[in-house]
């Protein structure tokens, strides 16, 4: 029996999709989202194919696929993307043209094709930054004209990093007056723990980017993506977008749950 690993953002909705896959004759394991140790699990017990639902948080699905392609042990596993906003799916298709794309209505035929034709010479994007090559940083962050943007503990040269801003954007160093989005920088787990209540309060005004140094998995004592997500979730926040800021920083965008 062929094994399928399913990534789906919502566990309740995923239950119906799992039933579809099982009824099609597959053994299924389910992952709700990107986790810190998912690559270890894949290497220990690689599936025959991966199905990634892009209905929500497509950036997470893209990161999962890119992580799989970066590893020699997992890059030959067929990747099947289902659903998703056409514009965002088109961006992923540019990065991974040899993956398979479709909907839940035709998942059976897509999986049959994917399993019969795994990638022989899989496309491996040069870096995670390739996913953002065609978009400016302000576009990735969701900064739009006339927005008030709060920068908390940002590097001194970060205004230069942002580059040209849309007309009417106001950068603030304190959360006073009107503002639409916050960029909150943290360098270590203790910084995030100390600032999470403030972040939660800021999320009452609009979405908050929690931004931390890249390379946390490799650097002992530093923040990782999963730690940032877990701390946010534990304090009533939910992340719905991920982005590389530059070669130094990564970010998750949070809003208040519910």
Image (cartoon, rainbow, N blue to C red):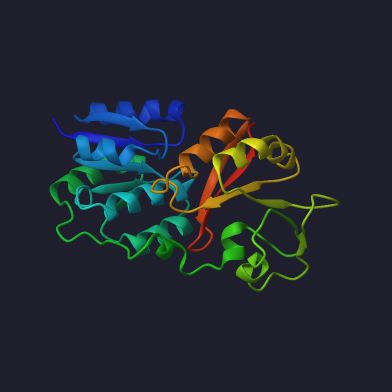
Find the residue positioned furthest to the right.
177
Residue at the spot 36% in from the left edge and 47% down from the top edge = 64
Q: As rendered, which of 103 and 120 lies closer to the eye?
A: 120
Q: As rendered, which of 159 and 83 lies closer to the eye?
A: 159
Q: Quadrant of the N terminus?
A: top left
In which quadrant of the rendered view does residue 107 lie? top left
| Direction from residue 127 to residue 118 in the image, left or right | left
Residue at the spot 25% in from the left edge and 59% down from the top edge = 98
Q: Position of residue 50 (x, y in %)?
A: 27, 42
Residue 205 showing in the rendered view: yes
In which quadrant of the rendered view does residue 99 lie? bottom left
Q: Position of residue 21 (x, y in %)?
A: 27, 31
Q: Position of residue 146 (x, y in %)?
A: 77, 63
Q: Position of residue 152 (x, y in %)?
A: 70, 52
Q: As rendered, which of 230 and 104 lies closer to the eye?
A: 230
Residue at the spot 38% in from the left edge and 27% down from the top edge = 16
Residue at the spot 55% in from the left edge and 40% down from the top edge = 189
Q: As rendered, which of 222 and 166 lies closer to the eye?
A: 222
Find the residue positioned furthest to the bottom.
164
Find the residue positioned furthest to the front.
220
| Direction from residue 185 to residue 17 in the image, left or right | left
Residue 108 showing in the rendered view: no
| Direction from residue 152 to residue 59 in the image, left or right | left
Q: Quadrant of the C terminus?
A: top right
| Direction from residue 24 to residue 163 in the image, left or right | right
Total numbered labels placed on residues in the image: 0
């Amino acid at each position: 029996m062929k094994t399928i690993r399913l990534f789906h953002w919502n566990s309740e909705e995923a239950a119906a999709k799992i039933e579809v896959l099982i009824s099609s004759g597959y053994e299924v394991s389910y992952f709700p989202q990107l986790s810190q140790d998912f690559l270890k699990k894949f290497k220990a017990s690689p599936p025959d194919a991966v199905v990634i639902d892009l209905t929500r948080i497509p950036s997470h699905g893209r990161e999962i696929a890119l992580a799989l392609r970066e590893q020699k042990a997992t890059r030959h596993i067929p990747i099947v993307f289902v659903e998703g906003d056409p514009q965002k799916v088109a961006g992923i298709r540019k990065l991974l043209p040899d993956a398979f794309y479709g909907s839940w209505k035709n998942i059976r035929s897509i999986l049959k094709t994917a399993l019969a034709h795994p990638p022989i010479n899989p496309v491996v994007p040069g870096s995670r930054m390739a996913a953002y090559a065609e978009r400016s940083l302000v576009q990735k962050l969701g900064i739009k004209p006339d927005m008030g943007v709060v920068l908390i503990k940002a590097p001194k040269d970060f205004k230069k990093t942002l580059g040209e801003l849309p007309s009417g954007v106001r950068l603030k160093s304190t959360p006073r007056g009107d503002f639409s989005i916050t960029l909150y920088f943290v360098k270590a787990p203790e910084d995030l723990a100390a600032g999470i209540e403030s972040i939660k309060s800021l999320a009452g005004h609009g979405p908050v980017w929690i931004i931390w140094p890249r390379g946390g998995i490799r650097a002992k004592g530093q923040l990782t993506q999963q730690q940032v997500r877990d701390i946010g979730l534990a304090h009533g926040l939910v992340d719905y977008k991920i982005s590389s800021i530059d070669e130094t920083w990564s970010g998750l965008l949070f809003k208040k749950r519910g």
